[in-house]
Image: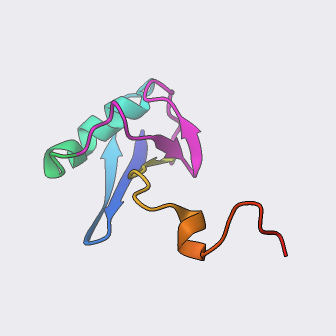
């Protein structure tokens, strides 16, 4: 079955379509995509993954046409970037 795997850094983005077995997992598709080899700093033991923006485990089973997303870690506090506290509701 055909699925896609995507990973993006600020300076480089990759979207790979891959063929995987019928009962493949998210991990299987990521490995088949070659993305871990292209991004040696990618650490799947700590980075989160999702399917169509919903967090899933690496062992989640795939369905035809799904898009697997590898999320990069948050490096900045979004509240600090906004310039306010989480309690600021005015």
> Can I make out residue 20 in this image?
no
When asked about the image quadrant of residue 45, the answer is: top left
Query: In the image, is residue 10 above or below residue 19?
Result: below
The C terminus lies in which quarter of the figure?
bottom right
58 and 71: which is toward the camera: 71
7 and 22: which is toward the camera: 7
x, y percent for residue 74: 44, 55
Left or right side of 16 for 69: right
Query: In the image, is residue 62 above or below residue 77?
Result: above
| Residue 38 located within the stretch drawn in magenta | no
The N terminus lies in which quarter of the figure?
top left
x, y percent for residue 59: 45, 24
> Can I make out residue 37 in this image?
yes
**Residue at 32% across / 35% down in the picture?**
44
25 and 72: which is toward the camera: 72
Q: Main secondary structure of the magenta part?
A: loop
Query: In the image, is residue 21 above or below residue 66?
Result: above
**Residue at 44% across / 27% down in the picture?**
22
**Residue at 45% across / 41% down in the picture?**
49
Region of the chain picked out in magenta, as a range: 42-65
**Residue at 60% across / 75% down in the picture?**
83
């Amino acid at each position: 079955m055909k699925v896609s795997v995507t990973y993006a850094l600020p300076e480089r983005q990759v979207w790979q379509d891959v063929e995987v077995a019928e009962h493949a997992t998210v991990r299987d598709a990521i490995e088949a995509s070659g993305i871990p080899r292209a991004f040696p700093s990618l650490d799947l033991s700590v980075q989160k993954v999702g399917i169509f923006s919903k967090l899933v485990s690496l062992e989640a089973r795939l369905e035809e046409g799904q898009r697997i997303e590898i999320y990069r870690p948050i490096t900045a506090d979004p509240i600090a970037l906004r310039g306010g506290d989480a309690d600021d509701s005015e």
